[in-house]
Image (cartoon, helix red, strand yellow):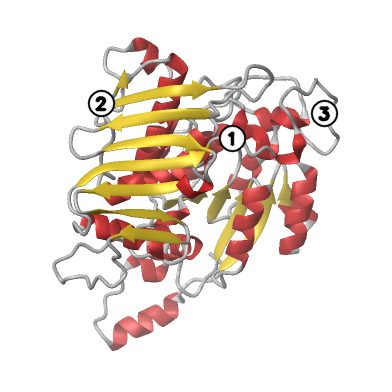
Amino acid sequence: MNSQTSRRRFLAAAAAAPLILPGRILGACGATPPNSKVRLACIGVGGQGTGNLGAFLNDERVQVVAVCDVDTNHRARAAAMVKLKEADAMKDWREVIARKDVDAVMIATPDHWHAVIATAAAAAGKDLYSEKPLAGSVGEGRAVCEAVKKHARVLQCGTWRRSGMKTRLACEWVRNGYIGEVKEILVGVPGKFMISGGYTGMEPKEPVPAHLDWEMWQGPAPAASYTAARCHFNFRWVDAYSPGYITDWGAHFLDVAQWGAGRDDTGPTEISATEVRRRDKGCYNAPEEFRIEYHFAKGPRVVMFSSTDEKQWGVKFTGSAGWVFTENERLESEPNLRTVQFKESDERLFLSNNHYRNFIDAVISRGRTAAPADVAQRAATMCHLGAISAKLGRAVKFDPAAENCGGDEEANALLSRPRRGAWKLTA
C-alpha cells in the first residue's frame, strides 16, 4: 500500500498501553490500512467498464493506477478520465495483475473472459470487483469461488441491486411474511435484443480495425471472423459468448429472486426452458424469447420469461396474502406495505447503499460484500442452467450441492465451456 502504520509509532503506543490491534489496522493479512488508498486497476473499460471506473473515481479512498482494454480507443478514453501516463494504459490484463502496485481489479470484459481473468487475479493476490454473471459457465463460476476462498480474496459481483434500498426492502417484506406464504416468483426480462449500432447480425466478414486486437478480444472463445456486429456491447446476443438476456438481465433478477426467497445457499433441482425462439440467421443466435421454470426442493418455483412489455421487467413475489414487485426504482405491493413497521424479531438483510463503496469497505476491513462469490454463483448457475435447457430443448435435473446434473452426460457436458488455445483457469 502507499503508506503503512509506522512501526515506531506502533511500538510507542504498545508501550504506553496494553492495546492489542487487529491485523486489519496494520494492513496485515492482505488488508488495506485505513490511512491508505486502495490501488485499483480497471480491466475492460468499454461501456459498463467506463461507468464502473467513474464510480470508483468518486470514492476518495481509491486510486486508479492502471486501465486495460484490447481496444485502443477504450484505453485512451479511460486513461484521459484518470489522467494516467501512457504506460499505465495497457492492452494485456496479464501485465496488470503482475503489477505490485495493484491491490484490486475491476473486471468488465465480455462474459467469456470473466473466469480466466478472475482466477488469475485472485491467485496474484488481487481483490476483485467483477461484472455479472460471475462467469461464463457453472464450472467456471465454481473455479472463481474456489480461487477467491483459497487466496483469501474479497469479491464483489456487479449484481448491484443487492445495494438498492427498494430491492432490499422488498426482499425483507417477503422474507418476513408480509405477503404471506410465497407461492411463485415471476422474473420478467426483455423479449427483443436491444442491439447497439443498428446491426442485424447478418453483416459479412470485414477487416479488423487497427485500434482493436481481435485475437485478444476473442481469447478463450471459439475463433470467428471479425465483424463489428459481434463485439463490444453486442457480444451478448452471440451464443459463443453469452446466452442473451438469460444472463444479461437474468443474473440481476434471478439474484433478487434468490435473495427474497432466502435461497442464497442453494439452487433449483429441475429446470425447464420452453417457448424458446432464436433468430434464424446470422451471428445473433442466443435465445431471444423464452420461458424458463425453476423448481426447488423447498419453496416456490421461479419463472423467468421474456416480454416486450417494459412494465413486466423485474421481479414479482406472489404470496398467499399479497404480492411485491421490485425493479430498481420501482417498488409496488398489494396490499400497500409502505407503512409497515418492522418488528424487532423480523429478519433484516445485509445493508449496503452503494455497491462500489461497499466493495472498498470490504477491501479495507476484509469483511463481506453485498454480492460475494458464492452468492453470485447461485444466481449465475440458474442463468446457465436455463440456457442449457434451452439448448437441449428439454428439462434438466440438477444437484445444487454437487453442482452437476447427475447421470445426464449431455447436460453435464454443457456445465463448462471449452477454452481455446492455452487459456486456462488458475487454481
Distance from disc 1 to disc 3, alpha carbons, whole Å, reads: 28 Å
Of badges 1 and 3, nearer the viewer stands: 1
Q: Residue at x 61, y 30 (%)?
A: 237
Q: Which residue is identified by label 3? A: 208
Q: Counting residues from the N terminus, which is met first, the one under dot 1 or under dot 2?
A: 1
Q: Amino acid at mark 3?
A: Val
Q: Counting residues from the N terminus, which is met first, the one under dot 3 or under dot 2?
A: 3
- Density class for disc 1 (Cα within 10 Å; few <14, some 14-19, many ≥20) is some
Q: Residue 192, which numbered label?
A: 1
In this rendering, would 279 be left or right of 342? right
Q: Residue at x 48, y 35 (%)?
A: 306
Q: Position of residue 79 (x, y in %)?
A: 75, 57
Q: Amino acid at mark 2?
A: Asp
- Density class for disc 3 (Cα within 10 Å; few <14, some 14-19, many ≥20) is some
Q: Which residue is identified by label 2? A: 399
- Density class for disc 2 (Cα within 10 Å; few <14, some 14-19, many ≥20) is some
Q: Counting residues from the N terminus, which is met first, the one under dot 1 or under dot 3?
A: 1
The answer to whether any part of residue 139 appears in the image is no
Q: Residue at x 62, y 40 (%)?
A: 94
Q: Position of residue 99 (x, y in %)?
A: 61, 50
Q: Amino acid at mark 1?
A: Lys
Q: Position of residue 425 (x, y in %)?
A: 49, 30
Q: What secondary structure is marked by label 2? A: loop
Query: CB under 8 Å between callouts 3 and 2?
Result: no
Distance from disc 3 to disc 2, alpha carbons, whole Å, reads: 43 Å
In this rendering, would 399 be left or right of 248? left
Q: Residue furthest left?
A: 345
